[in-house]
Image (cartoon, coloured by chain):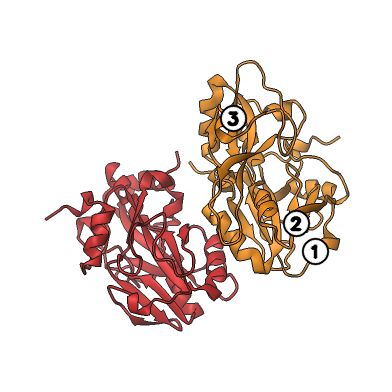
Chain colours: A red, B orange
Amino acid sequence: MTDVATMTPTDARRRFRDGHVAPTTGWCDGWTQANLLAVPEALAWDFLLFAQRNPKPCPVLDVLDAGETAGPLLDGDIRTDVPRYRVYVDGELVDEPTDVTRWWQADLVSFLVGCSFTFEAALREESVPVRHIEQGTNVPMYRTSVRCRAAGAVSGPLVVSMRPVPADLVAAAVRVTSRYPSVHGAPVHVGDPDALGIADLDRPDFGDVVRLEPGDVPVFWACGVTPQAAVMESRPSLAIAHAPGHMLVTDARNSAYQVP
Amino acid sequence: MTDVATMTPTDARRRFRDGHVAPTTGWCDGWTQANLLAVPEALAWDFLLFAQRNPKPCPVLDVLDAGETAGPLLDGDIRTDVPRYRVYVDGELVDEPTDVTRWWQADLVSFLVGCSFTFEAALREESVPVRHIEQGTNVPMYRTSVRCRAAGAVSGPLVVSMRPVPADLVAAAVRVTSRYPSVHGAPVHVGDPDALGIADLDRPDFGDVVRLEPGDVPVFWACGVTPQAAVMESRPSLAIAHAPGHMLVTDARNSAYQVP
């Protein structure tokens, strides 16, 4: 079996297009992964403004024109190349298909939003362990009590991903991820789940439970599932997103989003 | 006379509101300066998407709701607090007032876009001279032959600002400005005006001529006048902007936009 870490984005997308389903953490080291959100054109302004006003959870990497299914970041088809999707009608999750061709509308505007999986290879290169990869699971994600800044009809809570980090490597994790502001950048919070309104780390709202090793501290990064939480609250007529942790692997190199 | 470098944003905006006219280079060290562009709501999507697709020249710091004249970045009034404005009707420059109250419309959406004046204090702190400040002039700005990525009806060329930098300090200038991606970040080009389609450095399209000292190399940064060049090309019914180099001084600290 091919090691998914060394796979090219083209090959990964082909695998997913052919029906393979898996979280994309650990796939295609060095290539940027993206969250997907597609909404009808009439709602696109509010969602783009929401993203602009909340750049930590919603760093926009690209916006496709209405009806477009490919773009500079992907030589493929956003309707088929994500491992699993979520389809929301009036804010309710109605389908989790591996292909959204039958849900597609010509007026859908697609947003590609940065994903923290992008910096996980850099963390491991600097000897910061990534526990959910070690444990073979998806990253855990939580809704928080922190409110995003609203835009028009769009509002919602901040969603975070959590990675347990050994206490003596927290500073390194901050330093490494700070270099990637376009894919959530530095942590928004270190160490105290209560302060984010997270009652129980073992009950993530999205993704899987991850086990803390002795001496690990929970470190929280802003998460690109935040727009989906806004969909659930703001209830647009239709929204198509990736399933949390099941990202679009793009043709952009991580280095394109790294700052010194 | 108060040293403009140590003035607070509130005091600077009051000076400009009271009719003082000057380029803002060198004003309010440590505080973020912004380009202004206000367009009718019906055109706002295309302009926001244009900015998103061209983040080097158009790093959006904030977007005000239609009709709003203040926001989190300024406790003031964007119609009066900029030293000088430019008003465009159908893409033609029709007025350069110091107050745009009479041009204001309730449907105008204002974009605040990062400005490279923001990092000039950091350059000087690292002993990189800023020649136009030394020479008491505005920075020179040039239209280039580089095309921005279009969005809907909005298209135009990249505009750059130019600062002469001693050859042995170019690397320092790159390093320092790289830390400020939200205010144009690292240079887009170093050393060869021809490659940008700039025929004569002594004929800037905006701002003033600056004299190169012996051993200086021309260094080019993406410039927030780019949206104005797009206005001239795309000809919206109305657009209100700052006069080049005459920026809005905001209440945001530069450090808020610095990356490690």
Q: Nearer the viewer, mark 3 or mark 1?
A: 3
Residue named by callout 2: B240
The quarter of the image holding the N terminus of chain A is bottom left
Residue named by callout 3: B193
Residue A63 numbered tag: none
Q: Residue at x 53, y 37 (%)?
A: B186
Subunit that carries the residue with mark 2? B
Q: What whole-number distance in Å separates the C-alpha atoms at marks 2 and 3?
A: 30 Å
Q: Position of residue B37 (x, y in %)?
A: 69, 55
Q: Nearer the viewer, mark 2 or mark 3?
A: 3
Whether labels 2 and 3 share one chain: yes
Q: Is residue A79 above or below residue B199?
A: below
Q: Residues within 10 Å of mark 3 (few under 14, many from 20)?
A: some
Whether labels 1 and 2 share one chain: yes
> Pointer 2 and pointer 3: residues touching (CB < 8 Å)?
no
Subunit that carries the residue with mark 3? B
- Locate residue A14 relative to residue B157 in the image: left or right: left
Q: Position of residue B109 (x, y in %)?
A: 69, 64
Q: What whole-number distance in Å separates the C-alpha atoms at marks 3 and 1?
A: 38 Å
- Locate residue A114 relative to residue A27 in the image: left or right: right
Q: Amino acid at mark 2?
A: Ile
- Locate residue B73 relative to residue A64 in the image: left or right: right
Residue named by callout 1: B104
